[in-house]
Amino acid sequence: FFTESMLESGFAVITNHNIARDEISNFYQAWEHFFVHEKPEEFLAKGEDQAGYFSEEKAETAKGNTAQDLKEYFQYWPGTKVPPHLIWMLWLQENTASSIWHRIDRPFPEYLSQEHTLLRVLRYPPMKGPIKPGATRAAAHEDINLITMLPAADEPGLELKSKSTGEWFPLAAPA
């Protein structure tokens, strides 16, 4: 089912995994703390590598849109200075069946290089003040990466586009 889902939409929901709810909750809490109470500006993205923290004012504008996305994020490339709670790409490698990695075009460890790996932790802060016309949290887009991992959703809004029909449909994350 996992492979079929990935082929149909490029997305799969994994349930009954062995990651404790507390670990997921701690992940969210650690990053929320980073964005709200720590000093993310100490990790500001600099230079052409686009690694580091992007404030709401520096967030991207989705391809084909004119209004900037209403989010902030931390973007990681190997070798980037990171907060200490960024470890799950290695967990993914260690806990995924090797039969899945054999279906990609190169060994998984090769993706963990500056050339192939981008990890982005997104935060959609509470809305403040008037919103620019056309602005959205994240406009419709394709993820062009090997893996986009969403540990869980705490708000509705995620939609997937079927590769076969082109239709968008809402996705509710399991509780």
Image: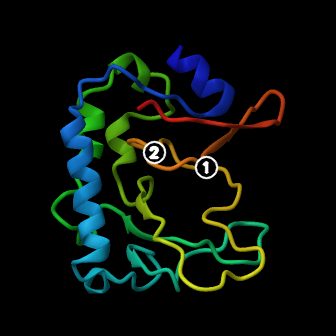
Q: Residue at x 77, y 74 (%)?
A: 134
Indicate whether 55 appears above or below 87.
Answer: below
Q: Amino acid at mark 1?
A: Gly
**Amino acid type, label 2:** Ala
- Give how far across and how far down residue 175 sits, in percent: 41, 32
Q: 13 left or right of 20?
A: right
Quadrant of the snapshot with the N terminus: top right
Identify the secondary structure beneath mark 2.
loop
Residue sitting at the far top? 1
Residue that label 2 marks: 153
Q: Position of residue 81 (x, y in %)?
A: 23, 72
Q: Nearer the viewer, residue 104 or 30?
A: 30
Q: Are marks 2 and 1 in contact (CB under 8 Å)?
A: yes
Q: Which residue lies at the image location 32% right of the left edge and 25% below the top edge?
A: 96
Q: Residue at x 48, y 45 (%)?
A: 148
| SS type, badge 1 | loop
Image position, residue 4 (x, y; %): 60, 17
* Residue 160 rendering spot, x and y as whole percentages: 67, 39
Q: Examine the image and state in which quarter residue 70 appears.
A: bottom right
